[in-house]
Amino acid sequence: MRRRNSSSAGVAVLAALAACSPVFNWRDVPLGDGLLALLPCKPDRAQRDVDLAGRTVSLEMAGCAAGDATFAVARMDGGSSPAEAQQRMEAWRASARAPWRARGKVQETPGRVPGAAQVPASVDLVADGDTGNSTGVQQASMRWFARADGAGRYTLYQATVLGRPSDAQALETFWEGLRLR
């Protein structure tokens, strides 16, 4: 009988701890040596090659799901000139917009990331609607920005939130947590 009570008490303590755990457990996550991002959970990391306007590029990504949304940050080489970085960012943005073009609403506005390169300019995108794919995602918020290092090389970034976070402040916390170094 005593063993049953202690195991029941253990289960009750675990249940109470689980109920107290936050949905958003924010943490700093480095992406390469140029960006520190604030993500709401422990991220998975991946690297893959993608076709971008007929050119294969390598993307490094970190992301996780919390509170009914997926939060992710990706980076890729932007080249060695503002014009090359602009061209690559435009191709990346076009690729990301494509699922919403025919079936949804896409709105782009100037973005803001402290310390980001002026060219290519930072851009925010909000997309709503059915993308026609199996993910069921109805909303996406994205921010593109660039960083130029001392040697004149550019790194391009895309920060993304897919879905509607259960906490209204989560999106703003994510945007404010993007810090170039």
Image: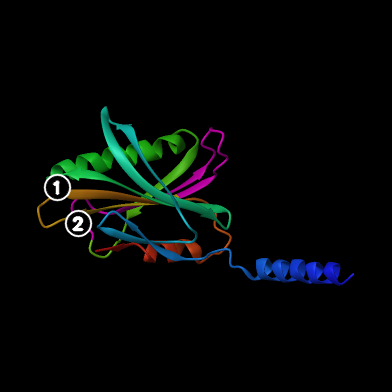
The C terminus, quarter of image: bottom left
Magenta stretch in the rendered image = 116-140
Q: Residue at x 75, y 69 (%)?
A: 10
- In the rendered image, which residue does mark 2 sit on? 117
Q: Residue at x 51, y 36 (%)?
A: 131
Q: Residue at x 54, y 43 (%)?
A: 137
Instruction: Say if the magenta span includes residue 128.
Output: yes
For the residue pair 56 and 174, the one nearer the viewer reads as 56
Q: Residue at x 14, y 43 (%)?
A: 83
Mark on residue 82?
1
Q: Earlier in the sequence, mark 2 or mark 1?
A: 1
Check contact, mark 2 vs mark 1: CB within 8 A.
yes
Quadrant of res 32 = bottom left
Looking at numbered disc 2 in the image, what kind of residue is underneath it?
Ala
Circle 1 SS class: helix
Mark on residue 160?
none
The image shows residue 65 at horizontal and vertical percentages of: 53, 52
**So how many labels did they put on this image?**
2
Label 1: few (<14), some or many (≥20) within 10 Å?
A: some
For the residue pair 165 and 121, the one nearer the viewer reads as 165
The image shows residue 127 at horizontal and vertical percentages of: 46, 46
Looking at numbered disc 1 in the image, what kind of residue is underneath it?
Pro
The N terminus, quarter of image: bottom right
Instruction: Say if the magenta span includes residue 91.
Output: no
Magenta: predominant secondary structure element?
loop
Circle 2 SS class: loop
The residue furthest top is 54
Estimate the spatial distance between the alpha carbons at disc 2 and disc 1, rounded to whole Å. Answer: 9 Å
